Amino acid sequence: MKRVAPKRALIVSVGYGEGHHAAARALAQEFCARDWSVRVIDPCKMAHPFLFELTRRFYQFCVRRAPWLWAITYEQTDTADWSVKPFAPGLRGVTETLAAQVKEFCPDVVLCTYPLYAHMLDALRLEGRVKVPYAVVVTDALEISRPWMVNKAPLIFLPDEYSLERVSERYALDFNRMAAVGFPVKREFHPDADRGVPDAETLWIVYGAYAPLGRVQQDLAALIARYPAACITVIAGAHCADLLHFASERVEVVPRTDRMHELFARAHFYIGKAGAATVFEAYASHLPVLVNYALPGQEQGNLELLLQDGAGCRVRTTADMLVTIEAALAHGAAGWCRMRDAMAQSGRGRGAKGIADVLEKRFLYEE
């Protein structure tokens, strides 16, 4: 077997939400550990920083204040003709930035954690300006929009086998172009062997405050009243100032954190939004998820995957949340153990290794 050794990976991502960048960082970590030279870029931000910031703020507004508006936007992106977008006004500069980065870095493979870039590479390849192989790393589950799948990338990586079956049927895709490998999650996310089985006295909850403020306040008040001995870490985000009054010896309120992997390793539940990065980081940590908020569109698919695996629950109201926790802790926390074991058996959070293995087999060696 002859080694032909492609050793450069260009990873292209975008800063809308956390899923795209989280996947990109995990892939970079994995390839660096295998002695690849890696470059991670955000061509949208590089090409049009002011316009990018406006669109990013629009996305954040939809997430926080107007999920109905995001549903309309998502539907439009799902029905648009993406093959004409690479050289559309406002996007031409992004395409040229991507082309320049490929030319400068000379990668052996390009990994796209955002679907727009795959369509740009399609157009550049058609023009003869790009010859490097490229792959799409899908950062959603089950509810996967058209842009991810209707490009001409030689490889498309999906986070689970259910998504692979669904998109292959919906878009009539060749199975040889796709692989269900899991979602790329950084290696720091893993379960703590000393976590222990929870009860009312030892319960530890990580709460992501992404739901409307009124719901968040109701949830926290109810949790503190029902489980006064529980440790609760609140990732408060934009709600931080409104939630500081909940802080106490056992309740930590922070706007954000860079130690989520430590919290997830020790916690017993994550309660919050069904964002892709968070859901799959919970999978990697074997941490059952209670979803109290999910954006229309792609996040509904992440929720559906949790339910299908038996790894989490949808809690529509504060009362529903308390009932679900009570049931999970009953009979020696048998329900919690089932959800934890379902996550452990799924392998959903090991996508970075799976993607690197596939690419090394395809590109590093030839007979």
Image: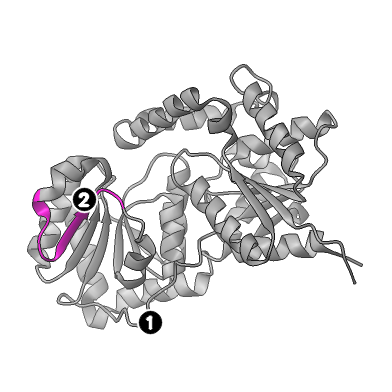
Residue 326, above or below 82? below
Q: Which mark is residue 317?
A: 2
Q: Amino acid at mark 1?
A: Ala
Q: How is the image coloured?
A: one colour
The image quadrant where one finds the N terminus is: bottom right
- In this view, the residue in front, 259 or 197, is 259
Residue 66, above or below 179? above
> Which region shows up in magenta?
245-256
For image coordinates 45% across by 70% down, the residue present is 343
Q: Is residue 32 left or right of residue 313?
A: right
Q: Amino acid at mark 2?
A: Thr
- In this view, the residue in front, 94 or 196, is 94
Tell me, yes or no, whether the highlighted magenta stretch contains residue 311: no
For image coordinates 12% across by 56% down, the residue present is 247
Q: Is residue 14 left or right of residue 96?
A: left
Q: Give the residue number, with chain letter if any, for mark 1.
A: 193
Residue 286 visible in the shown view: yes
Q: Which mark is residue 293?
A: none
x, y percent for residue 55: 45, 27
x, y percent for residue 59: 41, 32
Residue 159 visible in the shown view: no
Q: Is residue 152 left or right of residue 77?
A: right
In the picture, residue 326 is in which quadrant?
bottom left
